[in-house]
């Protein structure tokens, strides 16, 4: 870990985590939340896609639109979880800005809430981001004396939509601001846009060393700054370790492995070097070498982006809640938290 890396995310309160589907962005978001919470901090981990991915990754009950503690972090820290629900967010929004009270329930019974959250263009995303924004900007009311005062967070991690639509998702408030010239909607939209484009927010991209995820990462890494969003890190997930040194890999790729030497090694290990077994091993080694070459080429593309790279290993048995903690520790060691 370099001092530059350790200080790179100082001042960031909102960590947006995106990535192509299947890259493990929810797992990385959970690991980042645990890493940020270490040392006694409190972090909110929020999801907006209704997939309950966080509960599955951390092996906890399904999340709701009410914040609940989902994990303890090293050093006494806490991770709280939230599944942002557009309908609940709209009712809360109407009460906050328009003091509708029971009228909000009437609107829900008449289907107006469902209409606004499923049909009206952009409204759903505005509400989802608005709820996350509120958690980031939350300040304790000194006059509040209730039993459940609003929780303050040292950081918020957002498990965001995939790279293919994250720019539109994050930029939806600017579209709304263009439609609403005045009033509370315009004011909140401007405030959310200002936060997302400030140094308090960073958009991190999760990828695999495969052609399609890397291409989406390259595209998003170019599109996000153009749209005005603060560049974050690239997290390379499920990195495989090479089983052979470079000399052996080159020989395997070119078909130049010494089959007699391999047979001798098998015999020395007490395995009879039958022709079929030997042939299968050589083919598998060649495939492994080709895979490593592909991954090295994709890694070079990512290094050319000029973003800080963090690498997380492949866990062949899958990632459970304990594995997420291992990944959190690795992110901390590399300087992401």
Image: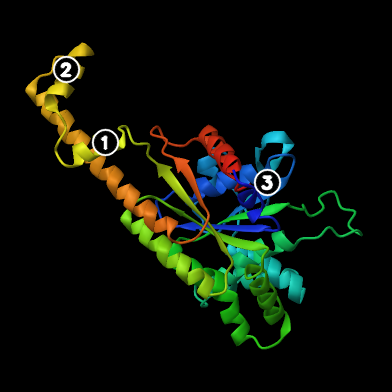
Q: Secondary structure at mark 1?
A: helix
Residue 36 can be seen in this image: yes
Q: Nearer the viewer, mark 2 or mark 3?
A: 2
Q: Residues within 10 Å of mark 3 (few under 14, many from 20)?
A: some
Residue to which mark 3 is pinned: 68
Q: Position of residue 100 (x, y in %)?
A: 74, 73
CB atoms at circles 1 and 2 under 8 Å apart?
A: no
Mark 2 / mark 3, whichever is N-terminal: 3
Residue sitting nearer the eye, 316 or 60: 316
The answer to whether 109 is drawn above or below residue 182 in the figure is above
- Circle 2: element type: helix
Location of residue 117 in the rendering, given as x and y in whole percent from the top left corner = 55, 70
Q: CA distance from mark 1 to mark 2?
A: 19 Å
Element on which disc 3 rests: strand
Which residue is painted at 68% across and 44% down in the image? 37
User: Can you identify the residue that label 1 sits on?
Assistant: 247
Tag 2 residue: 264
Q: Is residue 20 visible?
A: no
């Amino acid at each position: 870990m370099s001092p530059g890396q350790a200080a790179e995310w100082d001042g960031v309160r909102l960590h947006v985590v995106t990535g192509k589907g299947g890259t493990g962005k929810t797992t990385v978001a959970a690991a980042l939340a645990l890493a940020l919470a270490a040392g006694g901090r409190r972090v909110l981990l929020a999801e907006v896609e209704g997939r309950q991915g966080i509960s599955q990754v951390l092996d906890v009950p399904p999340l709701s639109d009410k914040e609940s503690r989902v994990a303890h972090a090293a050093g006494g820290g806490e991770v709280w979880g939230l599944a942002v629900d557009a309908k609940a967010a709209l009712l809360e929004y109407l009460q906050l800005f328009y003091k509708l009270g029971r009228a909000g329930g009437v609107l829900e019974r008449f289907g107006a809430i469902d209409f606004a959250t499923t049909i009206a263009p952009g409204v759903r995303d505005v509400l989802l981001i608005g709820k996350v924004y509120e958690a980031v900007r939350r300040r304790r009311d000194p006059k509040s004396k209730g039993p459940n005062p609003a929780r303050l967070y040292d950081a918020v991690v957002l498990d965001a939509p995939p790279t293919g639509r994250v720019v539109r998702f994050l930029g939806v408030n600017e579209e709304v601001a263009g439609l609403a010239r005045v009033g509370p909607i315009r004011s909140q939209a401007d405030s959310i846009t200002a936060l997302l484009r400030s140094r308090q927010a960073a958009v991190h991209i999760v990828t695999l060393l495969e052609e399609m995820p890397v291409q989406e990462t390259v595209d998003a890494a170019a599109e996000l700054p153009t749209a005005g969003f603060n560049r974050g890190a690239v997290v390379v997930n499920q990195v495989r370790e090479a089983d052979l040194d470079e000399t052996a890999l080159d020989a395997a790729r070119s078909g130049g492995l010494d089959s007699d030497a391999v047979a001798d090694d098998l015999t020395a290990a007490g395995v009879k070097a039958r022709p079929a077994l030997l042939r299968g091993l050589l083919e598998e080694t060649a495939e492994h070498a080709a895979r490593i070459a592909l991954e090295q080429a994709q890694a070079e593309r990512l290094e050319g982006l000029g973003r800080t790279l963090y690498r997380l290993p492949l866990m062949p048995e899958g990632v459970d809640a304990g594995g997420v903690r291992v990944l959190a520790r690795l992110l901390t060691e590399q300087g992401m938290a």
